[in-house]
Amino acid sequence: MDAVVVRDLVVERGRRGVLHGLGFAIPTGQLTGLLGPSGSGKSTLMRALVGVQRVRSGEVTVLGEPAGSPGLRRRVGYVTQAPSVYGDLTVRENVRYFAALYGRGAREADAAVADVGLAEAAHQLVDDLSGGQRGRASLACALVGEPELLVLDEPTVGLDPVLRAELWARFAALAAAGTTLVVSSHVMDEARRCDRLLLLRDGDLLADTTPARLRADGGSPDLEEAFLALVRASAGVPA
Ligand SMILES: Nc1ncnc2c1ncn2[C@@H]1O[C@H](COP(=O)(O)OP(=O)(O)OP(=O)(O)O)[C@@H](O)[C@H]1O
């Protein structure tokens, strides 16, 4: 079954067209990377998936219901680029608070803190954390609810390569266990960790592909090069 179905999605922001009629479906348990340059519409598309974006036309169906339906609140986790955690609580207190909202216990909360690599900072106030740590605390608050669909807007920004790799391994494990993940990034290197790639450019879907197919179609083992080749081809520029 498809966890997400998007049909002819058109979004305007500030009277400008931002998404120009996107369509795709994401099967349950897939780790999908949403990639594209800054301003290509990744965050806007994610907002539409979680139902917080006014759409001009088209349909977004999530877990069988229209995006944003009240019944989806506990089934969909969303982490924005702006960490949404309480600065005057510790990491552990934040995650335990969100755990309680989802009917989960302290054990699950502590596991989520460990999953994002913050076990040693669990007793620190969120206000005293680095930007990258704060982002991970926010991610732990979303993970603890064990949502069926996780929508993560650039979760690895500002993280060192080791943590980045650990988080992607965690995402892959979640997908293998049946969670559907949509993860945005503008770092093409992260694309190789995804089952499926949606490449956005200027509000259009430039390609709906996989890392292997992108390498083949773009004629390069390097995903960034392959992506650039596709961009050039779509613009009619010779390689
Ligand atoms: N509140 C807003 N009002 C008007 N236009 C907006 C608003 N937010 C975003 N936009 C425009 O919509 C387009 C898509 O923005 P969006 O944030 O979805 O891109 P993005 O791919 O997520 O970029 P980034 O990687 O920099 O986060 C951009 O041209 C941006 O200027």
Image (cartoon, rainbow, N blue to C red):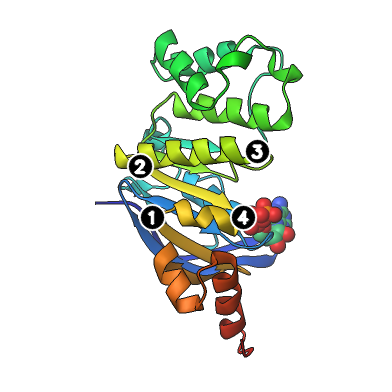
- In this view, 139 is above or below 154: above
Distance Cα–Cα, label 4 vs label 3:
13 Å
Q: Is mark 3 within 8 Å of ligand 1?
A: no
Distance Cα–Cα, label 3 vs label 2:
23 Å
Proximity of marks 4 and 3: CB atoms separated by less than 8 Å: no
The mark closer to the camera, 4 or 3, is 3
Proximity of marks 1 and 2: CB atoms separated by less than 8 Å: yes
Q: Which mark is residue 104?
A: none
Q: Which of the marked residues, 1 or 3, is nearer the chain's N terminus?
A: 3
Distance Cα–Cα, label 1 vs label 4:
16 Å
Residue behind mark 2: 175
Q: Amino acid at mark 3?
A: Asp
Residue 58 on image: x %, y %: 45, 63
Residue behind mark 4: 187
Residue behind mark 3: 160
Residue 24 on image: x %, y %: 39, 64
Residue 54 in sight: no
Residue behind mark 1: 195
Quarter occupied by the C terminus: bottom right
Q: Which of the marked residues, 4 or 2, is nearer the chain's N terminus?
A: 2
- Of residues 5 and 135, which is closer to you in this image? 135
At 47% from the left and 71% from the top, the residue drawn is 215
Q: Amino acid at mark 4?
A: Val
